[in-house]
Amino acid sequence: MSEIVIDIVESSVQHLAIIMDGNGRWAKQRDLPRLAGHQQGVEAVKRIVDECVQRKIRYLSLFAFSSENWGRPQAEVDALMSLLLQFLASQQQKMVAEGIKLHVIGDLSRLSISVRDALADVEQKTSLGENMTLILALSYGGRDEIVRAAKQAAKQVLVGEIEIDQFDDSSLTACLDTAGLPDPDLLIRTSGEVRVSNFLLWQTAYAEMYFTDVLWPDFGSEELDKALNEYSRRKRRFGLTDDQIDS
Ligand code: IPE
Ligand code: IPE
Ligand code: MG
């Protein structure tokens, strides 16, 4: 009986988005270099990908590197990029085998050619994956994404592909990096910070927010269940009244 209930509760999140924060503090608490925190952060990513596949969550968006993170010390940026390359190399076979499709969002033009090539390669190899889409936000900023989308939309108007009066919410949505993907149902942020730090600004308009003090390297299946259970107790109204939702 309880297993059935858990299945219903958990499958109700179709798209989970996570701001994976707190790697540096995890390392600092242990007198380790920040890199050690990022390494453990990658282990947490592998764990959570598995947990989400098991729970039949169809879309998992992970904030891995923000447009603002480019301002970090070059050595840290370089270390994060090598961790990304290692992650891709070590996970691609498993992703293909498990039907996990990679989709990268963000301003990829700022990434090195080797990183871009590796991402494109894994995206291509995993493109037939049907169990879960893993959306990796890299060099990503919500405002930057909206600006790029607005430019693309303006071009469509200029060449007469779309009438300005017909331009609406869905026209802009179609120009975002996340075009074709459903909006996140639940946004989790770890590490105790209560802000969205420029992540999926447009797409999380009606996402449920869940903040936990747990640092990302310590985030695991129990923490995920807590968040999913909390989500199942929330009532999403989308601007309507309780009565409207209940009927
Ligand atoms: C999140 O951990 C990982 C990235 C932003 C790349 P942080 O590196 O921000 O860790 P804290 O916030 O300093 O603890
Ligand atoms: C947000 O974390 C970005 C990622 C998790 C990749 P940050 O650590 O960069 O956010 P702030 O600076 O605390 O807002
Ligand atoms: Mg941080």
Image (cartoon, rainbow, N blue to C red):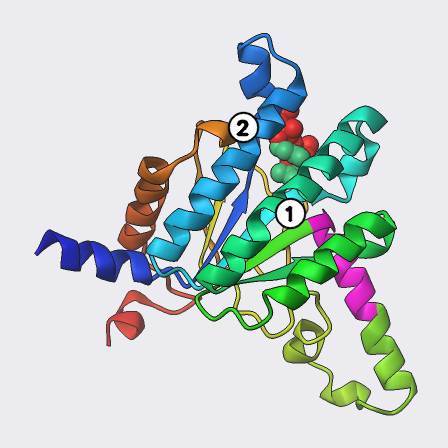
Residue closer to the observer: 153 or 110 = 110
Residue 3: percent from left, percent from top: 15, 54
Name the image quarter holding residue 73: top right
Residue 56: percent from left, percent from top: 36, 61
Residue under numbered circle 2: 40
Q: Is residue 13 above or below residue 214?
A: below
- In the rendered view, does 236 fall on the left or right side of 61? left
> How packed is label 1: few (under 14 Cα within 10 Å), some, or many (20 or more)?
few
State the residue at coordinates (83%, 32%): 71
State the residue at coordinates (55%, 32%): 41
Q: Which mark is residue 89?
A: 1
Q: Residue furthest left?
A: 1
State the residue at coordinates (44%, 64%): 58
Residue 138: percent from left, percent from top: 71, 49
Which three-letter amino acid code belongs to the residue tagged 2?
Gln
Name the image quarter holding residue 204: bottom right
State the residue at coordinates (62%, 43%): 87
Q: Which residues lie in the magenta part?
A: 138-150
Which quarter holds ligand 1? top right
* Residue mark closest to the camera, 1 vs 2: 1
The stretch drawn in magenta includes residue 166: no
Secondary structure under tag 2 reads: helix
Which three-letter amino acid code belongs to the residue tagged 1?
Ala
Would residue 240 be seen by someone viewing this image from the given angle?
yes
Q: Residue furthest right?
A: 158
Quarter of the image containing the C terminus?
Answer: bottom left
> How packed is label 2: few (under 14 Cα within 10 Å), some, or many (20 or more)?
some
Q: Is residue 216 above or below residue 154?
A: above
Chief SS of the magenta region = helix
- In the rendered view, does 14 fall on the left or right side of 166? left
